[in-house]
Amino acid sequence: MNILALDLATRTGWAHTCGESGVQDFSPRRGDSPGMRWLALRAWLNRVLDMVPTDLIVYEQAHHRGGAATHCAHAMIGVVESVAAERKIEVTNRHTSTIKKFAVGKANAPKERMLIAACERWDGVIDDNHADALWLLALVASEMEGC
């Protein structure tokens, strides 16, 4: 199964079973309307999905405490779900604590520990967003193997 894992945020970490991964920056540019970020995400996601076959998109379901970050996360999830629906791609999520427990054995591990563990396992880890996407992909791939 071809899986795209996303750590959705202004700096979105991503990883695909094809071996490609990285970070995509969706920071608003000066003069952009609020919706430009969502259009940029839609365009980028469609480019990725055009390049590599994808059967499943999985995203990190983070803690939502309100404010701008929560608004951003919810809007990004909506974009991902709509693109997936248009392309008939299955979508699921995993909670942050599940990913952390898989990665380092502790559901409330700090971001720094996740990043260190990712750097020990993979070359070229860019930042914590990239690390989270790599761990998310590894988690879901291991779950699929257990089926």
Image (spheres, rainbow, N blue to C red):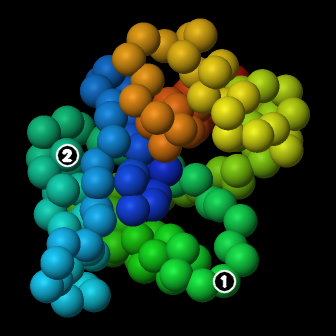
Question: Can you tell which quarter of the image residue 52 is in?
Answer: top left
The x, y position of residue 74, in whole percent, is 51, 77
Residue visible at 18% across and 56% down in the picture: 44
80 displayed left or right of 140 = left
- Please tell me the numbered disc located at residue 66: 1
Circle 1: is it few (<14), some (14-19), or many (20+) Cα within 10 Å?
few
Q: Are marks 2 and 1 in contact (CB under 8 Å)?
A: no
Name the image quarter holding the C terminus. top right
8 displayed left or right of 119 = left
19 displayed left or right of 97 = left
Residue visible at 33% across and 35% down in the picture: 22
Query: Does the rendering let one see residue 114?
Result: yes
Residue visible at 20% across and 89% down in the picture: 33
Mark 2 residue element: helix
Mark 1 residue element: loop
Q: Which residue is mark 2?
A: 48
Q: Nearer the viewer, mark 2 or mark 1?
A: 1
As drawn, the residue found furthest toward the front would be 30
